[in-house]
Image (spheres, helix red, strand yellow):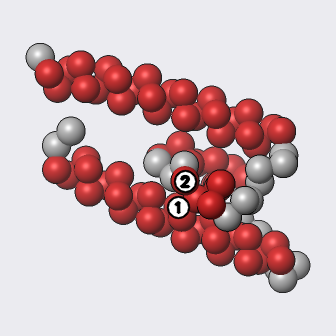
Amino acid sequence: MNEALMYFCIVINIITFLVFGYDKRQAKNNKRRISEFHLLLLTAIGGILSMYLFKHKTNKFSFILSFYAIVILQIVLLYFGIQTFKS
């Protein structure tokens, strides 16, 4: 993995982590929330840890299903990216 991609992954995970935390705080205070589409989009880009750390959206089946589909897609893409990088 090249350095720029590594830094991108770190930054997007930090951003996603903060957005999940913000949405959880908004939920607790009955305020305007982040849409599920945007949470899933950030998750697709790279934020996996935050959902479980904040225990947020962990009981909603449709969200969990979408989440794991994205995780599987990321693993597949990472695998093929590593294979391409090796050759």
Q: Judge left or right: residue 50 versus residue 66.
A: left
Element class at badge 2: helix
Say if mark 2 contacts mark 1, CB within 8 Å. no
The three-letter amino acid code for the residue at tag 2 is Leu
Q: Quadrant of residue 75?
A: top left
Image quadrant holding the C terminus, namely: top left
Q: Tell me where residue 62 appears, x and y as whole percent.
A: 81, 38
Outermost residue toward the bottom in this view: 29
Residue under the image location 25 percent in, 26 percent down: 82
Residue occupying image coordinates x 55% and y 71%: 18
Is 22 left or right of 7, judged from the image as shown? right
Residue 31 visible here: yes
Q: Mark 2: few, some, or many residues within 10 Å (few <14, many ≥20)?
A: some
Question: Callout 1, which amino acid?
Answer: Thr
Q: Residue at x 58, y 59 (%)?
A: 50
Residue 43 screen position, x and y as percent:
56, 48
- The residue where tag 2 is placed is 49
- Residue 30 or residue 59, whichever sits in front: 59
Q: Which mark is residue 16?
A: 1
